[in-house]
Amino acid sequence: MSIAYLKGMKKRMLFTFCLLLLLLFLFGLSISVGSAKISFLDVYKVLLSRISTLFKANVDETCEYIILNLRLPRVLGAVVVGSALAVAGAVCQAIMRNPLASPFTIGVSSAASFGASLAIILGYGVLSCYGGGYGYIVTNELLVIVNSFVFCMLCAFIVSVVAGVKGSNPTTIVLCGVAVGYFFSACASIMQYLGEAEALKSVVAWLLGDLGRVTWRYLPWMSLSLMVIPLFAVLGWRLNAFNMGDEVAASLGVNVKRLRATCIALICFMTATTISFVGVIGFVCLVSPHVARIIIGNDNRVLVFASALVGANLLLASDTIARTIVAPVILPVGAVTSCVGGPFFVYLLLKSRRVHWT
Amino acid sequence: MDLSLEVLNVCFSYDSKPVLRNVSLEVDGGEVVALIGPNGAGKSTLLKCVAGVLKPQSGKIAVEGVDLSKLSGKDRAKLVGYLPQYIPIVFPVTVFECVLLGRLPSFWTSPTGRDVEAAEHILQSLDLAGFADRYVDEVSGGERQRVQIARVLAQHAKVLLFDEPTANLDLKYQVEVMELIRRVTRQRRTATLLAVHEVNLALKYADRIAVLNGGELIREGKPEEVTREMVRRVYGVEAEVVKYDGRPRILF
């Protein structure tokens, strides 16, 4: 029977590896499609030539420029954002013991919207205080990013403190997050109500989410969110203990309150570092973990990686569709993700032989 | 030899409402002690204090002479195993994964080959080998309880705590679970403390009975020492104490 368990583990690893292969394929495909036609193989040639001098690209310069400076950042952005949000969702569901939980249900997205609205409409933000005095110009874009990040982390702080104090009940924490979320979205609504039409349009555009905002300058910052993934994998078995309830987890030596509060802070950090740059892209964080659960089960140690890859694939596929389906118009990726992911998820729900959450 | 489990003058209160008052209790290795008493008497709270889920405000809890409050959570979990009354599984796992979770105190990030072997061994000894790949929400109530007991046993703890292990089980499974608990207590020489609602199950299977009422340990002794007056005082129920199969039972 342990052989069956180990076999099951191997199957999960294999599936995760297949997701990785799919991602590599989608990666090339996504870069190759667009207004300038680039061959699928040229994409990999150019990428490989950049990694090692052993490979020669022999591709014309315009092509190389388009690949490296226009499309690659966007595609990498989709991978980073998709995987970070999916992992945040998976861990959030595990620690709250709630299949509906995600970083967005604990108020992070509303906090980000408020921060962004504040910056776009009033042109005022956390950085403004320093802007003049230290002699560098704060661009509007940077203001929006820093503002929404700071408000995300403020929300994280409130919810983790509540978790630290009232750690015994995950439902209390979710409710608290929902309340914090309502508060921030009300503040954002007031901002938007008062805002000028032009500013309002930018706010709506920001809220819809756009991976086109990803540039080489921002990518290193966004990738910080991925650093948390291995940490969650290390904590995987402790997260599994949450599944049996706080009492069992505590009796197995897990410091329930501390671990839950830490995880909330990390989840909010992952979400904040991604959505501050690209805007509110929902749904990936709720649905990717469930897709992974249906296929590989509920062992968080593997689930973390599998969710990350499902999320990356989903967002990358959605963004490719968003860019190409009615080109040259680019549809908002957040909306396309829900349009693509929703029916796919319902299909999996119908097809799945058993219930993976109760 | 040191006593296996020693609870000394433990007091616990939720906010300012005292739930346990100066409770002292000893359980030897190889012995099953049943906590009985009405709802709200503090049975579950006492078990949670020993399991490390709650922190008593005063008093000492020691296993083989080692003060549990001085140990890390992980080291404590190697000594004390605990099965709560209700386990809210939202994301079902397989029986094997569930039992493997009991090895959590013994490994750092991932179970090793030895942990997998230990889980396998426990499943075999509890006749659960055939269920290993099934999901915990797919097995019957009695089997699910046996899986949870296997999970606790996988900890290889010296002290076993069970909170209402027979709740919601039919008569067949009640007997089966109690016999299993008694069997493993004898085989592994564990100090076993359980909270029981069904007084007759306690009288039939426990070596000693401890009676909690209003947060105080009012009586402690052999099942034979349970009297009609005691049942009236603790539960407010008129009952007849009779002997059956060499042990007392109550009829009401």
Image (spheres, rainbow, N blue to C red):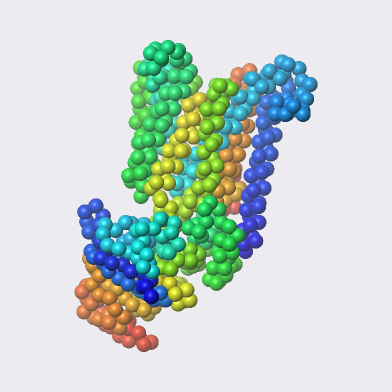
Residue B114 coordinates in the image, percent (x, y): 58, 62
Identify the residue at image location x=41%, y=14%. Answer: A134
Identify the residue at image location x=38%, y=31%. Answer: A154
Q: Is residue B208 above or below residue A82?
A: below
Residue A36 coordinates in the image, percent (x, y): 70, 18
User: In the rendered image, which quarter is residue B243 located in?
Assistant: bottom left
Q: Tell how many labels.
A: 0
Residue B167 coordinates in the image, percent (x, y): 39, 67
Residue B193 falls left or right of residue A328 = left
Q: Nearer the viewer, residue A302 or B242?
A: A302
Q: Where's the N terminus of chain B, which quadrant?
A: bottom left
Residue A295 falls left or right of residue A136 = right
Q: Where's the C terminus of chain B, which quadrant?
A: bottom left
Answer yes or no: is residue A171 visible: yes
Identify the residue at image location x=63%, y=55%. Answer: A8
Residue B79 coordinates in the image, percent (x, y): 43, 64
Identify the residue at image location x=60%, y=48%. Answer: A295
Q: Nearer the viewer, residue B58 or A355?
A: B58
Residue B172 falls left or right of residue A38 = left
Residue A86 falls left or right of residue B179 = right
Q: Nearer the viewer, residue B5 or B91?
A: B5
Q: Is residue A141 above or below residue B33?
A: above
User: In the rendered image, which quarter is residue A226 located in?
Assistant: top right
Answer yes or no: is residue A284 visible: no
